[in-house]
Image: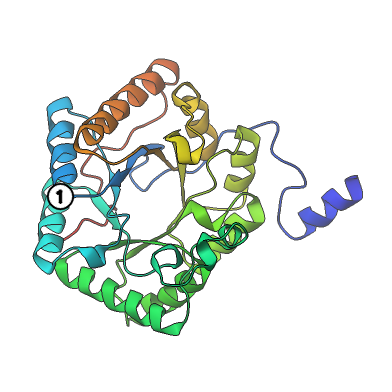
Amino acid sequence: MRQYQRLLEKYGFPGRDEYDIPDSSLTFPDGAHYRMEVSGIDSLQEMEALANEKVKRNVPVHRVICMSAGTHLLSFQELRDLSQIGHDGHIELIVIPGPRANFDIGSHAHSDWGKYSGIRVRGTDNILFLLQDIMRCIEAGIKGFLLYGEDVLFLFHKMRLSGDLPKDLVFKLSYTSGVSNPVGAKLVQDLGADSINPVTDLTLPMLSGLRKVTTVSMDIVVASFENLGSFNRFWETPEIVRVSSPCYLKQELQPSVENAKTKVKYCEIIREIIEMSRPNLKFSEQNATDLRISKG
């Protein structure tokens, strides 16, 4: 067994999961160890409710993943309004643009076996449509995008490096791409992901293994609805932050105006748990300067 572990180590990867779960030595640029991320914000009404609730509770919400049905279903004025809410609340918006397989006319993604293929973009025309929708969002002032495949991440990162896309964009790869080990995490980082969204059920030794070979932030789901396993890891968050820093603590709950408020309350509870258990772990302020805030 040890000879095979050494073979993995030869190529820069841990020989086993990190069972000693060491402290991460990395932080965000502001020196903080963790931030809050909320998913499932799918309307302007939900976004407004979240922004108001975070002011009411005085709890930072640093990043919001929004419009899971696709930004192509919003008018340009609605995109501008969304951008304005993010700007005013100093929230980094990560929107979900354009076509992908589960919204396409093909049936493969909906078949029993097709579900294992992920929901990547199908065909070249759809890559073109996706790029077109991203450009529309950029024009509306939005800077962050959730992508559903390593293929388009590779392409759009090359465009960003060359200047064909703005250099201050944020690209995040969905957990549906299946990043679940250090090799996959390193690959995604090298392809241009600005944060890594691993699958939702990794243990602390597994997360520590991912952190050992990466430097970008990790986005760890700590509460989920039924489609993702219906779990709550609030009490694990101090240890998750300790081994995964810098990380976003992420909620995946069903979209609704009322749930938008609940998600902010959960951010408050998570912060309280971490501060009670590990007060040495630093929480980012809302105005962290490295967040890619949309234009007002």
Q: Position of residue 274 (x, y in %)?
A: 40, 23
In front of the other: 138 or 169 = 138
Q: Position of 42 compared to 194: left or right?
A: left
Given residues 108 and 63, the one toward you in this image is 108
Camera-side residue: 57 or 40?
40
| Side of 1 relative to 70 (left or right) | right
The residue to which callout 1 is attached is 44
Q: Position of residue 93 (x, y in %)?
A: 26, 54
Q: How is the image coloured?
A: rainbow
Is residue 170 found left or right of 292 in the rendered image? Answer: right
Q: Secondary structure at mark 1?
A: helix
Q: Residue at x 15, y 58 (%)?
A: 83
The image position of residue 117, as x and y in percent, is 58, 63
Residue 138: which quarter of the image?
bottom left
Q: Is residue 57 above or below residue 112?
A: above
**Is residue 195 shown to the viewer in this render?**
yes
Is residue 245 visible to the viewer in this orientation of the structure?
Answer: no
Q: Please determine whether, in this image, residue 204 is positioned above or below residue 129.
A: above
* Residue at 44 percent of width and 17 percent of height: 277
Q: Quadrant of the N terminus?
A: top right
Residue located at (69% from left, 31% from top): 20
Residue 212 x %, y %: 62, 47
Amino acid type at mark 1: Leu
> Which residue ends up furthest to the top in the rendered image?
276
Residue sitting at x 27%, y 73%: 133
Crowd rating for badge 1 (residues with CA inside 10 Å; few <14, some 14–19, many 20+): some
Q: Quadrant of the C terminus?
A: bottom left
Give residue 141's quadrant in the image. bottom left
Place residue 113 in its image quadrant: bottom right
Give the mark count: 1
